[in-house]
Image (cartoon, coloured by chain):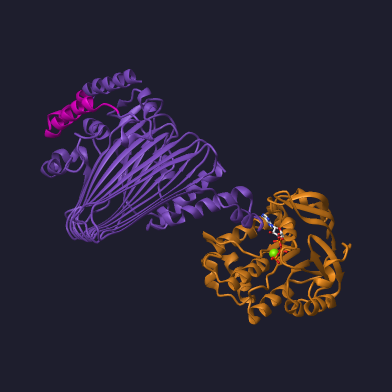
Amino acid sequence: MLSIKNLHVSVEDTEILKGVNLEVKPGEIHAIMGPNGSGKSTFANVLAGREEYEVTDGEVTYLGQDLLDMAPEERAREGVFLAFQYPVEIPGVSTSHFMKTALNAIREHRGEEQLDAMQFLKLAREKMQLIEMDEKFLHRSVNDGFSGGEKKRNEIFQMAVLEPKLAILDETDSGLDIDALRIVANGVNKLRSSDNAFIVVTHYQRLLNYIVPDYVHVLVDGRIVESGDKNLALRLEEQGYDWVKDNDAVTA
Amino acid sequence: MDSEKKDIREWYQTAFADFENSLNGGASLPFHAVRKKAIARFAELGFPSTRNEDWKYTNIAPLLKHQFQPVAEAPDIAAESLAPFLFKGLDADRLVFVNGVYNEALSSVSNLPDGVILDTLENAFTTHADTVTQALGKTVSYEEETFSALNTAFARTGVFLSVPAGVVLERPLYILHVSKTEGREFLAAPRNLFLFGDNSQARLVEGHYNLDGGTSFKNSVTEISVGADALVEHVRIQDESKDAFHFATTQVEQATGSNYTSVAIDLGGSLVRNNLNVHLAEERCEAHLIGFYFGSGRQLIDNHTMIDHAVPNCESNELYKGILDDRAHGVFNGKVMVRPDAQKTNAFQQNQAILLSDDAHIDSKPQLEIFADDVKCSHGATVGELDDESLFYLRARGIGEQEAHAMLRLAFARDIFNYIKIDAVRERLEELVVERFNNKA
Ligand SMILES: Nc1ncnc2c1ncn2[C@@H]1O[C@H](COP(=O)(O)OP(=O)(O)OP(=O)(O)O)[C@@H](O)[C@H]1O
Ligand SMILES: [Mg+2]
């Protein structure tokens, strides 16, 4: 589904990703761990199409297409979803209007009928219930004045509405209390199927108790230096990153 | 330049003679003596240059290149052609003017509460001669300012509304100006007089639209008197042709405890100058001056506001926001005068602009003149761009770039539109600006 080869990315002439390789197949869950500043968010944002990041080398194929050649909205319409580490507040745009516009853009792309306001509201309410969010959030401006945890839940709400094929969760667990963590994990597990895949960026093993990864990768200084199964996450939790830091890049 | 000014000044003086002849009986009424004094005064004042502080950022040279002609008659227009300017679901009394000329067939006025007078100014000169003579020109003098003098000289008609004490107008009054130039460069000088009695309530919607493009010059003066504890909401939509000259002066006088809100939306016009002056003459008044403008191409949109806190315990709140694209030019001049007696004044002013292109620009000049010491006054001005992070967030959810742009621009203007309390008007205007944004995203 997703094939990343030798991805090099720079920001303002500083190289952040220094040759990342990753293969993701439908139905898989990949966890990416790594120290602060190692390039995890850069990686996630590049996949979503953020323009400030300059891809200097490598290629990314998604469902047989050149992902790097697509605009952010095209990627989203083709099923790529990024749950942001820091969701943006947009005063003046209501969450319901935002999500209805987004969903209809995606549906149009898929050749499906547009949802009217009533149909959308029904769907949105179901998804809000799924992640135990009060429906009043639909009428509030996007993330405006939301608490840290509410913002993260709103990301999962959006994911539940848009039903992506490839969801990249960038530290969606950070800042969540234990109940919220369970709810978010639950949202992910509900969406999980043999057709879609997840890349879960996290610092903590605890999320991975709920969302059990097929693979765990360690990103250090812009390279994946270690890959393994879920036990790798447990070892990182116990021993930290020092023991992997000096590894050479591996092909995941 | 100077000779051009002189020529065009003479042009208007000559045009005045023709205009007089077209007035028929109107020239024998007492107001005509005022017109004559006004044209004489106009000749003395001449047109302002950018050396004049009030016109520092707004060069009116393009206006002086045209010979605009006052008109007594307007082309016929079909009722259906008004459809785009009517607000779906709005139940309002409506007065329609075409090229500044009243069109009775297109207007519709229901039964108004007892004592309410709603008529054209032209009729009111004879039917309510005393009231009109006494009130007209009381707050806007032709002596001091060129465009007020020019309006007074060429004022043929407009709206006269008098709402007696205690009366609440349930239905908004919609004053709809449409222009259809048919290639004639016409001058319209609407002159409006609104008298709101104590404890009365009213909602005014004023719309300025265009049917066929073309160049015209509208130079209006509106005098509004808001009685004690009266509540007036005034929405003004200007969506003239991209070649139109639109000059408007609105003068508001507020009595004790009154509340006046102006929401001004400017989308059209080649050269637009709005003067909005509010005189808080008695205590406990509240005034809200709210504005939004969107300029593209080479439009120049200039909002000059003046709030005069003459007495203690009044509150003014001013918020203007603009979005400028291409080579558009915005001007905001917000003068707030707090006179020595005006203790316990609250005056808040904000103006914000978003520039979408490197060639767009805004001149913004807050002007706080505070002569009292126990006051709360603040002002702020910001100029920025659309937020890239927000744009990416929307696009990352599948929303196209153009639509994402339009959403963010509307979001920026949202708090302005929220001041429009009539749902049908607010919703249509939001649609209209989004259409505009999408034409130009
Ligand atoms: N827009 C930017 N401009 C300049 N530097 C940037 C930018 N974005 C990221 N960086 C730098 O790139 C490096 C990687 O950042 P990134 O956010 O990808 O790290 P991360 O692994 O997600 O860290 P964390 O665990 O703290 O979220 C950091 O040194 C960061 O300062
Ligand atoms: Mg990060």
User: Chain A appears what colour?
Assistant: orange
Q: Give the magenta range.
A: B20-47
User: Is B233 left or right of B83, judged from the image as shown?
Assistant: left
What secondary structure is the magenta-colored segment mainly? helix
Q: Quadrant of the N terminus of chain B?
A: top left
* Position of B237 relative to B257 (above/below): above
The number of numbered discs placed on residues in the rendered structure image is 0
User: Is B230 left or right of A214, judged from the image as shown?
Assistant: left
Estimate the x, y position of residue B78 in percent, counting from the top left: 39, 37
* Position of B211 relative to A46 (above/below): above
* Position of B333 relative to A170 (above/below): above
Q: Let me know if residue B192 is in the magenta part.
A: no
Q: Quadrant of residue A134?
A: bottom right
User: Is B243 left or right of A56, judged from the image as shown?
Assistant: left
Q: Let me know if residue B44 is in the magenta part.
A: yes
Q: Is residue B227 visible?
A: no
Instruction: From the rendered image, report the letter of the chain displayed in purple.
Output: B
Q: Is residue B30 visible?
A: yes
In the image shown, does B387 or A140 lie closer to the viewer? B387
Estimate the x, y position of residue B430 in percent, counting from the top left: 47, 52
Estimate the x, y position of residue A34 in percent, counting from the top left: 77, 68
Q: Quadrant of the C terminus of chain B?
A: top right
User: Is B290 left or right of B409, judged from the image as shown?
Assistant: left
Looking at the image, which residue is at 51% across and 66% down? A140
The quadrant of the rendered image in which ligand 2 is seen is bottom right
Residue extending farthest bottom: A179
Looking at the image, which residue is at 21% across and 35% down? B144
* Position of B223 relative to A48 (above/below): above
In the image shown, does B315 or A240 lie closer to the viewer? A240
Estimate the x, y position of residue A61 in percent, counting from the top left: 82, 54
